[in-house]
Amino acid sequence: MEKKSKDFLRRIVEEDLKNGKYQEIVTRFPPEPNGFPHIGHAKSISINFGIAQDYNGVCNLRMDDTNPTTEDTQYVEALKDAVAWLGFKWEGDVRYTSDYFERLYEYAIKLVKIGKAYVDSSSEEEMRELRGTVTTAGRRSQYANRSVEENLDLLERMKNGEFAEGEHILRAKIDMSSPNMKMRDPLLYRIRHAHHFRAGDKWAIYPMYDFAHPLSDYIEGITHSICTLEFENNREIYDWLLDTLELEPPRPYQHEFARLNINYTVMSKRKLLELVEQGKVNGWDDPRMPTIAGLRRRGYTPESILNFCESIGIAKANSVVDVAQLEFAIRDDLNTKVPRVMCVMNPLKVTITNYEGSEELEAPYYPHDVPKEGSRKLPFSKEIFIDQADFSENPEKGYFRLTPTQPVRLKYAYIISCKEVIKDENGNVVEIKAEYHPDSKSGQDTSGIKVKSAIQWVEANTSKTIEVRVYDRLFKNEAPEGIEDLNPNSLRIVKDALIEPAVITQKPDERFQFEREGYFYADPMDYSDEAPVFNKIVGLKESFSKKKKKAPKARAKPQAKKEQIDGEVAPMTAEEQALFENYTKELKLNSEVANTLARDAKLSAFYAKALERLDSPVAIANIVSNEVARELKNKELNELKFTPADVAELIKMVEDETISTKIAKQVFEEMVKSGENPTQIVESKDLKQISDPAVILPIIKEVMAKNPENVEKYKAGNSKLFGFFVGQILKATKGKGNPKVVNELVTQELAL
């Protein structure tokens, strides 16, 4: 059995199998069907289904449909579609938590009968007061003294719909003095008078996540319940329920991993829904959205997304991944797969005055270094179009394309020279009169004319007009908060681009590399042969390092003429290749970061010294290949004011949650300027992340006291205001509040 790298989750699984704890591994992907799945769900899908595959187990797909006010069948179908498109198969039929409503209710009755659950009729204000704080114990409600018979009667009547929402709730009876606030008699059932898309109107009460999740796992025989870190504190409830109910083994155990966060992206389904509902994007599958449907429509492949998820690894601490890593993954996947074709985005007419007739030229679909074959016919005549950027009447130094005095090669065709420039009344160039050199045909050139570039072109009569949608990042800020951070230039539409005719004869769902422009995909919704529409998936990669100039050798023979090829990357030396192999295979760096480090001796030396101080290869590699690389562009190692040890110390402070990743960037900039070590900077500028609930809670209370109207609106059902409260609190702490702690405390305060 081929296994992936031994991340901590797989080590747990292997140990459990070795010890005979389980005979078969059973995992599950349990999303709530209240929105379209996004790239973060792709990571969870790849982990749960991937572990099941690696250890010959099975993975269930279960819809956590316990909130009828937000769930819908369209979201169920989107989740099923995403899992299948990524290449995974779930065990048996799709499961639903609602399948287990009867059994869950029976478990609730059992808890009541053994004195471990009760119906509470306190008001929200009373519950808030009785809950206590992180520094003071709570007090149990007077209703906890109800008899078993009274609790059972009330619970049955709640189920039958006799009470209004909020009039009663079912709570577990655990410990009102627990330091884990989630263990202070957590809610098990709430009243909801809403139509359920599967259960109809049968139920007037619905189980809470902390009650339904562990018991659904048990019912399905799940062995490893893999959740993201925000559920770490919920694990104690998970274990308490299974132990208190004395369920027969084997039982599941919960394990947490760091969720996926990407810069310039939001992962909150609430915020994504807001974008859709307010018309800021064109639906859940808008190619700018981080949803799997959006990425799919843009042209991403399942392989690229799974490779991305594998490259970033599975961690125990939250961090932010650069969106460039996702973009690299799709480039890396498409580079050897897709045919190269020519597209002129901004057409400029060229009339070749000395050419008569027409012909078809043979052109390969793939360059020489791609292990695929195939070619197409390129029509050629005296009227063609080139891109406006490929002609300059007054060129800057280093411009290698067509000018009034500089000839250029038409790729796969002939060399042409400009003879006349035609302009309109406003002085804009509208046509070029040119002459071609008959003996300069590509592959048969005997002209002796030297050119420095080859440009794309299309024949005027056979080319097809297409619409091209050029996408940029949806948000303009690296850490966007919401709609106010949208990038106004995230979509640019080119209406009159011209494509060579061979492209239109292909299947509409095929991907192409438009030479020098990037990778493109025929929009699966809007494409037709009559009105083709292409989405830009991603731009072409740039060279990772500039070719170094070599000293001329004595008696050097004249070099055969070479044409400039955009995006060409110099081959690695044997030493660089060895480093690259070590980085990717041993240290598990993604290919782009490994390439950057391996090709730069200064960076690789710096990286090696930092690793000696801290065994955190991925985190150190990310900062070295980006921030440190920026500083080393025009400096030597001994000119830097900071050391590898300083960088290692900075990373350790992030991993220990002493500072946030956002503050880490600020600390690094100060290291560059002053040369102080990060600990000194954090201490002197008071930049430590605030994680003490005793410090954060008063700030939360103050914010809520200043915004009573928003508190009431939230309680009335406007859950979108949750982000408002978190944002205000982080602002009050000058960005130093630990987001994880802030989210937990805000949740607790708003829940009562």
Image: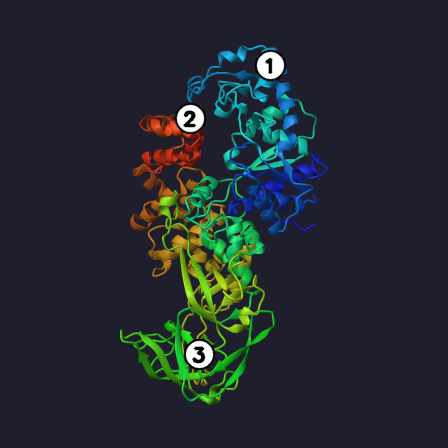
| 576 in relation to 407, above or below | above
| 652 in relation to 499, above or below | above
| 321 in relation to 100, above or below | below
Q: Secondary structure at mark 3?
A: strand
Figure quadrant of residue 403? bottom left
| 705 in relation to 689, above or below | above
Which numbered mark, 2 or 1, is in the foreground of this view? 1
As drawn, the label of residue 749 is 2
Is disc 3 surrounded by few (<14), some (14 to 19) or many (20+) residues within 10 Å? Answer: many
Sequence-wise first label, 1 or 3: 1
Q: As shown in the figure, which amino acid type bears the numbered disc 1?
A: Asp
Q: Disc 1 marks which residue?
A: 153
Q: Nearer the viewer, residue 235 or 437?
A: 437
Query: What residue is at 42 percent from the left and 76 percent from the top?
Result: 385
Which numbered mark, 3 or 2, is in the foreground of this view? 3
Residue 18 appears at what percent x and percent y?
Answer: 70, 38
How far apart in space, not on screen, are marks 1 and 3 (Cα)?
84 Å
- One can see residue 413 in this view: no
Q: Disc 3 marks which residue?
A: 384
Sequence-wise first label, 2 or 1: 1
